Image (spheres, grey):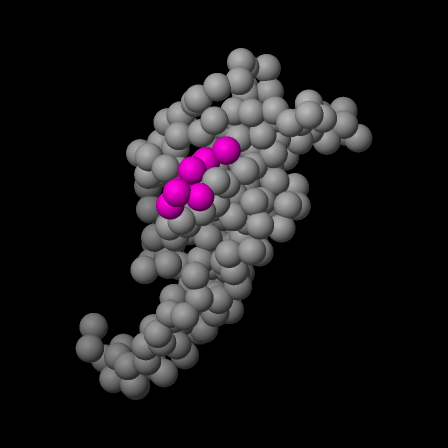
Amino acid sequence: MPKGHHYGRTQIRAYTGEYHRIHANVFKHLLTSPLGIYTINSEHLSDNHSKLVLKENKNDVRYVEFTINDKPHKIALKRDNRSASNKLYITCPYCQKQRQSLYAIKYAYGCRQCIGLHYASQSERPNERLMRRIRKLRKELWGFDWPDVNNMFENIYYWPKPKWMRWKTFEQKRNQITELEKKYWPMVDVQMKAMFGNGFINDF
């Protein structure tokens, strides 16, 4: 179930997290590789989405061609020469706009806009958005591998100060999270009562 799914509501939106995404840097080595047949190593892609032919047009622009559902899908490899980083972009086969990533759908590759995909955050309730922010701040302070860092039922008040951090800084960051959690739980209470009625809390 995608993150933005609402309880009791049929999902009608398609979300980015439901499709495998390929980034431009996957093709970076092809800028200097010999023309020919290559394969993207990914267990999430079908054979048609993995096998490609590296080609070059008369303007010396390199592109990769996938054959998906017996149809060619051409993706150009273009560098942004305006910046010092010389970032690589790939073009969407549909709108031809330069993108940093494309999504693999059943019979094609396409950008988020052309496919009509949404970010899960676009469908989040206010309390879901607040929960995501709290978890983000927790991970920034205690680390991604801290036990129960995602568990909203765990009180952070007694969690220890990281060794490298000053007490004043730690207390400011911890207090910020605590204040957000104080806002979060009343919002959850309202949602639970709306979903299950006033007897929800008494059942536990």
Residue at the extreme right of the image, as rendered: 82
Is 59 or 82 nearer to us in this picture? 59
Residue 172 percent across, percent down from the top left: 59, 48
Q: Quadrant of residue 200?
A: bottom left
Residue at the extreme bottom of the image, as rendered: 198
Residue 145 percent across, percent down from the top left: 37, 36
Q: Quadrant of the C terminus?
A: bottom left
Is 46 or 122 nearer to us in this picture? 46
Residue at the extreme left of the image, as rendered: 203
Looking at the rendering, the stretch of residues picked out in magenta corresponds to 65-71
Residue 36 percent across, percent down from the top left: 48, 19
**Which residue corresponds to the image point at 53% horizontal and 13% vertical from the top-left?**
34
From where the camera sits, is residue 160 visible?
A: no
**Which residue corresponds to the image point at 44% horizontal and 73% vertical from the top-left?**
186
**In the picture shown, does residue 133 fall above or below 147?**
below
Residue 70 highlighted magenta (yes or no): yes
**Which residue corresponds to the image point at 46% horizontal and 53% vertical from the top-left?**
16
From where the camera sits, is residue 110 visible?
A: yes
Q: Taking 159 as reference, is 87 left or right? A: right
Report the number of numbered marks: 0
Q: Quadrant of residue 1?
A: bottom left
Residue 69 highlighted magenta (yes or no): yes
What secondary structure do most residues of the magenta stretch adopt?
A: strand
Residue 114 percent across, percent down from the top left: 56, 56
**Which residue corresponds to the image point at 44% horizontal and 66% vertical from the top-left?**
13
Q: Taking 75 as reference, is 61 left or right? A: right
**In the picture shown, does residue 173 fall above or below 12?**
above
